[in-house]
Amino acid sequence: MAQTTATALPKGFRGAELGWPELERIPHPPRRIPLVGDVFGADVRRPVQDSMRYGRLLGPVFRRKFFSREIVFVWGGSLAADLADESRFAKHVGLGVANLRPVAGDGLFTAYNHEPNWQLAHDVLAPGFSREAMAGYHPMMLDVAERLTGRWDAEQSAGRAVDVPGDMTKLTLETIARTGFGHDFGSFERARPHPFVNAMVGTLTFAQRRNVVPGPLTPLLLRGAARRNEADMAYLNHTVDEVVRARRTTRGEGDLLDRMLETAHPVTGERLTAENVRRQVITFLVAGHETTSGALSFALHYLSRHPDVAARAREEVDRVWGDVDRPGYDQVARLRYVRRVLDESLRLWPTAPAFAREAREDTVLYDTHPMRRGAWALVLTTMLHRDPQVWGADAERFDPDRFDAKAVRARAAHTFKPFGTGARACIGRQFALHEATLVLGLLLRRYELRPDPGYRLRVAERLTLMPEGLRLHLDRRAPVARTPAAVDDPSSQARCPVTGARD
């Protein structure tokens, strides 16, 4: 139920001055200008990387002000661990996430904590990510991956480099569309991105632009962009409505959409409304492919730049999978080193680069910074994952062995957060990790990856992170003539770093 007026938190954007009684103790960038704040020298196209620069300069807790909006950023491991305490802090929906509410509403990602549809949808959909459900999705993931390798085979035969972010976006969109909603966008048969992808990118980009434009000037400065955003949202809604309409006439196979339409809450008997079904579908289609495509793209970049890592990962795939054409569901979890490559890529560039936490009641952050009820901070995950006190002086170096079992056990809890934290952490994290590990294994087994010598990693930002302009050259490998191990090692089962005992 919604809170009463007497105890409700302030509506809309809540500046740091409302919630941090000792705000002046927190450092801010030099050359702050009255009225406009810290806009001098700010990079509005890459706000995350801009904030990373200030994080290195100012330390593990700092603040930035854009006109009337002041935000506290946190990245120190101890501070972030304190914010992960669910008894004192909860998810805060603000900034870019709140800017997505016109299209995603009270979907799982964008719902406010007090909105009842969040818990209802979570309880109804959680069984859709059980081990049994995941095993059912696995063959469809393989089908989509084969469409990708068919495309890459043709590009390799023609001597052309592959567009990694573009093709990973096609792969992950088709995967979530088919497994979750029984829909085929035909992405690999298109010369250009599907209009759904263009509309999605448009809404994400617009949401990010609204973060850095002062509120009173938004209608003036973003008038044209706002019209395009309205058209993008209309297209997203229309596409999803068509998918749902088709499903109502033909029953699916027990996928996420079937659960949304037919499953009642196990305790209350409530069902999702038609409007909320649309919002959940949009949430899964957008969040279910945008972040995974970025994670795969970053991982492929690092594999191409570290041939020793690629060789070790490839040896594991050859040994574990042998010459089977289509690896089984359980065989994916046995790719322990491939999973470490993925985790290390997510450490350096978590594709969801930040998450916000708000105080449930008046409290003191890490026994140092008083916070009033409703005060919030933005945890800068990209810097949390580079904290030298957690990851060492070489935290900027790519090293998958940071995620071997011994290193994970030795590391402090709540220091690796690519999927958020707590009750509102990403519900689809195991889906994403299984899909990404499977695809990396398939690509490593089939190709040698050669980078463009002149390419230097550039990171594009649209609320999520993605390598910009990344293209790789491919060489086909000879088939492997080995037999996989007959018995699985139980210790090799992949474990989600968000919900594990340490991370």
Image (tube, helix red, strand yellow):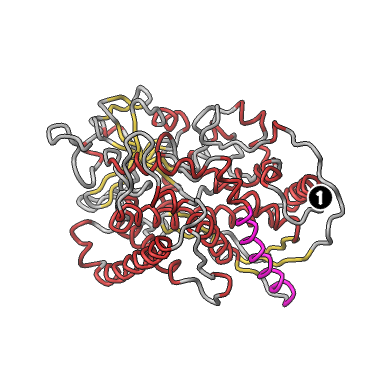
**Is 11 displayed left or right of 386 in the figure?**
left
Write down the quadrant of residue 125 in the picture: top left
The image shows residue 484, relative to residue 209, as above or below, that is above
Query: Which residue is at 26% across, 27% downward?
Result: 361
- The amino acid sitting under disc 1 is Gly
Front one among 67 and 264: 264
- Which stretch is magenta? 139-158
Q: Quadrant of the N terminus?
A: top left
> Which residue lies most toward the left here?
6
Query: Percent x, y for residue 195?
Result: 44, 71
Query: Which residue is at 37% across, 44% downward?
Result: 121
What is the secondary structure assignment of the residue under circle 1?
loop
The image shows residue 234, relative to residue 304, as above or below, that is below
Write down the quadrant of residue 75 in the picture: top left
The image shows residue 43, relative to residue 84, as above or below, that is below
Q: Quadrant of the C terminus?
A: top right
Front one among 225 and 63: 225
Count of numbered labels shown in the rendering: 1
Mark 1 Cα shell of 10 Å, populated few (<14), some (14-19), many (≥20): some
> Which residue lies most toward the top here?
367
**Is 77 displayed left or right of 485 in the figure?**
left
- Which residue corresponds to mark 1? 322
Write down the quadrant of residue 394 in the picture: top right
Query: Which residue is at 32% across, 28% downward?
Result: 369
